Image (tube, rainbow, N blue to C red):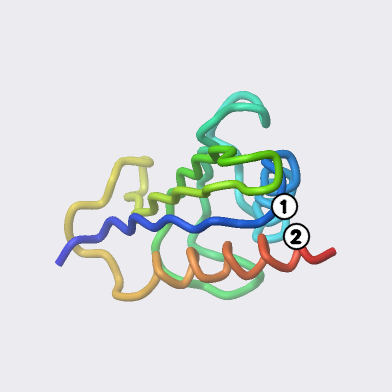
């Protein structure tokens, strides 16, 4: 069973708006940017085992790449996988559904911030 999730979505918003919503989603979910700067593309994010008071059991890494298809359309490519205790990609023993839960929460927060 592969632990890595690769997804792509298109949003009818500018690149800047999607980037701002993604960064707001990271803050809302108590994630930490792994990249040095908020302007980096892709945005690399580490999530702890506990998000919003809920213990999920595994740490999760998200890499979000943004690409402007036009001035009002942005493609978002997401790669997510579980991490071990020292921040390496977990190859076995991950809890089922944790990474997908984090991805779903990320999309929900991102889309909520886009509507705001």
User: Dot 2, crowdedness within 10 Å: few (<14), some or many (≥20)?
Assistant: some
Q: Residue 109: x percent and y percent?
A: 67, 65
Q: Residue 97: x percent and y percent?
A: 35, 75
| SS category of the residue bearing label 2 | helix
Q: What residue would you read off at disc 1? A: 21
User: Dot 1, crowdedness within 10 Å: few (<14), some or many (≥20)?
Assistant: many
In the rendered view, tell whether residue 20 sits above or below residue 35. Answer: below
Q: Quarter of the image containing the N terminus?
A: bottom left
In the rendered view, tell whether residue 64 sits above or below residue 28. Answer: above
Q: Residue 70: x percent and y percent?
A: 62, 40
Q: For residue 114, which numbered disc appears in the image? A: 2
**83, 114: nearer the viewer:** 114
Seen at 67% across and 41% down, the residue is 15
Q: Is 97 positioned to the left or the right of 108 in the image?
A: left
**33, 48: nearer the viewer:** 33
Seen at 53% across and 48% down, the residue is 75
| SS category of the residue bearing label 1 | helix
Does the CB distance between marks 1 and 2 fall below 8 Å? yes
């Amino acid at each position: 069973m592969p632990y890595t999730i690769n997804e792509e979505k298109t949003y009818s918003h500018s690149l800047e708006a999607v980037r701002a919503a993604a960064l707001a989603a990271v803050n809302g979910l108590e994630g930490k940017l792994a990249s040095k700067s908020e302007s980096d593309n892709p945005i690399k994010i580490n999530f702890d085992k506990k998000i919003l008071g809920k213990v999920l059991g595994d740490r999760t890494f998200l890499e979000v790449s943004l690409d402007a298809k036009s001035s009002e359309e942005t493609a978002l490519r997401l790669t997510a996988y579980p991490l071990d205790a020292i921040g390496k990609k977990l190859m076995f023993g991950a809890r089922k559904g944790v990474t997908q839960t984090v991805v779903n929460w990320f999309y929900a927060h991102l889309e909520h911030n886009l509507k705001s």
